[in-house]
Image (cartoon, rainbow, N blue to C red):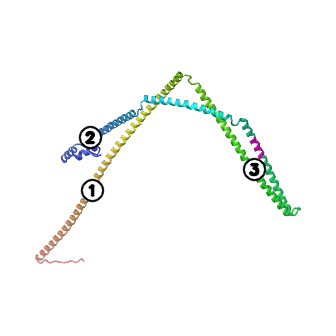
Amino acid sequence: MTLGSSTPGGINRITNSTGDERAALEGMLRAYPVEQLVEEVLVAWQELADRNEDLVTSKQRLRVLELDLAERKDEVAPEIAQLRAAESHLEETSARIVHLERLLEDSKKELAENKSGLSAEQLASLETEASQLRELTTQQDDVIGEMEGRMSQMVEALERAADAGLTSVTADEVRALKAQADSLSSDLDAEKAANDSLEEERQRLRDIADRLRGLLDARDKRLGELEEQLERVMQGPRSVSAEHDYLVEQIEELKRRLLERNREYESLRRRERRLHNDVFERDERIQQMSLTIADFEAALTDRTSEVRELESQRDTAVHELDGVKRSERTREVVGRVFADSLSLVRTHDERELKKEIYANSPNVERTIKTPN
């Protein structure tokens, strides 16, 4: 992490300072050792963390004060809530008494109407009649099925006998018998349709009986409820003072319940405040972590730029070194060529000198010997 990247204020101060101050600050920082600079950065970072914690606590206190002020503005005081609850309970009790009176009148009207309705004996007679109709239809279905089977057997036997010539009945008579059988089958179909309609009527009567039974059960249940409500009303306060005492007891009970609800509300509000505090702390931690990540990113960017600058310097140094090597190789080649040319010149001069000496020397007799 580079200096000045941990605190944006420090960066702003450094950027806004003049050239002389910047140069003086750079000279002072370069004069410090690395360990001291690290300690200074750690101390500044700790101070920044302490300031952030103080800011978080102040925000939490401000939020709590705002919640209390909102509660005061909304008039959510326990005494006002208790008074309103008592008034609402009184209104509910009066409305309940009126409702009970109306229910009593409705029950009396229903009793008067039900007296003129169907009795239990009529319902029993309808049920017996429906059962008898059910048995009769089942018997008729059995008889009709048996007759159809016999008729089909007889027709098949007659057809076989007429085809074989074993009987005096002709084909026309067989056809007539078939026509009669068809007419009888159509009559049977009509009878079946009548039976089906009768079955539908029986089912409708059964449904009517079930509905009547359900209405009677509902009437009995309603009468029982009305009797219970009437008993409760009759067992209630008999005079104004007793009614007042009863209402006072009910109000006390409601106050007790209201206190319990207020305690529950206070516990819920404390829990909400704790949750708000946790949320604020988490947000502050997230913000601090985001600042730290931003600092790390800035430091990483600085390091990346430094690495890139070092890479560019390395590339230039490599290029310069390659140029120096090439020039050195060229110098060596030129030196070797110069040395070779110099040695050639020297050998040539020596040969010329030897020739001149040989030419100026007296005649010397030379003998050439050959090997034996």
Q: Residue at x 81, y 59 (%)?
A: 179
Residue type at numbered disc 1: Ser
Element assignment for label 1: helix
Q: Quadrant of residue 365?
A: bottom left
User: Mark 3 or mark 2: which is in front?
Assistant: 3
Q: Please report the residue visible at 35 percent of the width from the left and 44 percent of the height from the top.
A: 290
Q: Which mark is residue 240?
A: none
Query: Identity of the amino acid at label 3?
Result: Ala
Spatial separation of the CA atoms under disc 3 and disc 2: 109 Å
The answer to whether residue 56 is above or below residue 191 is: above
Q: Earlier in the sequence, mark 1 or mark 3?
A: 3
Tell me residue 147's x, y (percent): 81, 52
Q: Which residue is mark 3?
A: 194
Position of the C terminus by quadrant: bottom left
| Distance between the alpha carbons at the discs numbered 1 and 3 | 109 Å
List x then y, in percent, for residue 56.
34, 37
Residue 118 falls left or right of residue 148: left
Find residue 101 and report its horizontal and vertical position in percent.
Answer: 58, 30
Q: Is residue 351 rendered magenta in the image?
A: no
> Which is more foreground, mark 1 or mark 3?
3
Residue that mark 1 sits on: 312
Mark 2 is surrounded, within 10 Å at the Cα level, by few (under 14), some (14 to 19) or many (20 or more) other residues, namely few
Please state if 288 lies on the left or on the right of 329 as rendered. right
Residue stretch rendered in magenta on the structure: 129-137
Q: Nearer the viewer, residue 118 or 163?
A: 118
Report helix, strand or loop for mark 3. Answer: helix
* Location of mark 2 (residue): 40
Q: Secondary structure at mark 2?
A: helix
Give the total of numbered labels.
3
The mark nearer the N terminus, 1 or 2, is 2
